[in-house]
Amino acid sequence: MMNDWKRVDEIIAEYGYSKSAFYRRRAECLANPRFRKAIIMDGKRTTFIVEPIWQEFLIWRSNQYEQDNLGLNVRGGHV
């Protein structure tokens, strides 16, 4: 689709998500003011994803996972 917008079914297929995995990430993205603009809801049934912002969200999410689960978030200093 033009202007870097994709339909939900395109994102699910291209990223290999199940529907439930996509909707969990979508909810997390919408809850974050920094990345909320990645989700374009045009009514109840039509949603588009702004892929560059979605990818920024995924990178942020990955960094959070690393910090929270791999012990890279050291209090009082840097690794």
Image (cartoon, rainbow, N blue to C red):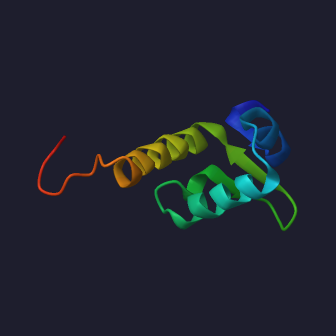
Who is closer to the viewer here, 42 or 60? 60
x and y percentages locating residue 27 in the rendered image: 64, 64
| Relative to 59, 17 lies left or right | right
Above or below, 64 against 43 in this view is: above
> Which residue is depicted at the point 16% across and 44% down?
78
> Which residue is depicted at the point 80% across and 48% down?
8
> Which residue is depicted at the point 19% across and 40% down?
79
| Relative to 72, 6 lies left or right | right
The residue positioned farthest toward the right in the image shown: 45
> Which residue is depicted at the point 35% across and 49% down?
67
The residue positioned farthest toward the front in the image shown: 70
Quarter location, residue 4:
top right
x and y percentages locating residue 48 in the rendered image: 76, 49
x and y percentages locating residue 36 in the rendered image: 56, 58
Above or below, 4 against 69 in this view is: above
Query: What is the count of numbered marks?
Result: 0
Q: In which quarter of the image is the N terminus?
A: top right
Who is closer to the viewer here, 31 or 77? 77
| Relative to 22, 56 lies left or right | left
The residue positioned farthest toward the left in the image shown: 76
x and y percentages locating residue 53 in the rendered image: 56, 43
Who is closer to the viewer here, 74 or 14? 74
